[in-house]
Amino acid sequence: MNMKDFFKFCFKENRIELLKEKSIRDQIQQIQDQFKEYGIELPCHHDLDYFNLQILSRGLKNKQVIESEYEALANEMFEIWQDLDYKKRNAFSQGALAEKKEALLWFSAQECRIFIPFFDELMNTLYDKETAVLQLPQFFKLYKNFKDRMIDPFHYRHLPYEAGFVDVQFLGSRSDGFGFYCRQNHSLYVLDEKKSCTILPLSISNRVETLDPQRTWGWIEAVLNQDQRAMLQWCVGCGQLNEKIKKKCIALLAKAKR
């Protein structure tokens, strides 16, 4: 059975071009402009680029909050701040910033709290537990010049999606991939460990805000297992595809039995 033709058929029936939506284009431009201020160009040609931009933008917001709160503390304690050694500055900052950091988006990885998904675990640990390093000469430049320290957020696989860094409904994960639902284009996405993406646009006449994670897990597993029969069977019974696509699935299943 030719699944490429099947997906083309689904796209023709239901596909909403995410990157052509005006609100999405405006958001992309805003994020790109944010990073241009730091000399960082962020092209956006595919849906995954857009989701990645959201992760980067929210990571940048977290970075700016931690930096600004630290600076505010230093200014508030200006009269004694210069007389404090590194250990005492860090102790003060940990206490003062604890509540603010807890309110930010974050997730755990390698026993570290990750606030900035475009930084590795070591850099996130410094921002979290050693915030006073920001006043050391070798780290002070990170306020404006951090391009060389950036990593691909996919280093953390599903965790930024699960933690809310992306405007999607996270549906579940296993060691070799994960799935999520994008409300804006009413589509299911499955990403494997190699960053290969499978998109299934659901019926545009029956759009919903959320999906049942248990019911959609069958699709995610079928895609990650590359089980074409299971994929088509799920499509027949999911209730989220129109009759034309269901008939196409039934025909493909029947053809495969011959």
Image (cartoon, rainbow, N blue to C red):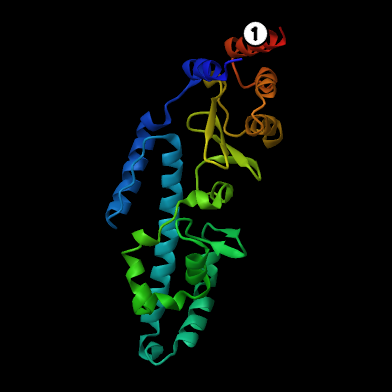
Q: Left of 227 or right of it: where is 42?
A: left
Residue 255's quadrant in the figure?
A: top right
Q: Quadrant of the N terminus?
A: top right
Measured along the vertical axis of the image, is residue 110 above or below residue 156? below
Badge 1 crowding class, 10 Å Cα cut-off, few under 14, some 14 to 19, many 20 or more, is few
**Closest to the observer: 127 or 150?**
150
Q: Left of 53 or right of it: where is 41?
A: left
**Percent position of residue 7, x then y:** 53, 20
Task: Say which element carries label 1.
Answer: helix
Q: Quadrant of the C terminus?
A: top right
Image point (64%, 29%), residue name: 226
Image point (52%, 34%), residue name: 197
Q: Report the residue marked by disc 1.
A: 251
Q: Number of numbered discs present?
A: 1
Image point (44%, 78%), residue name: 132
Measured along the vertical axis of the image, is residue 147 above or below residue 208? below
**Closest to the observer: 133 or 176?**
176
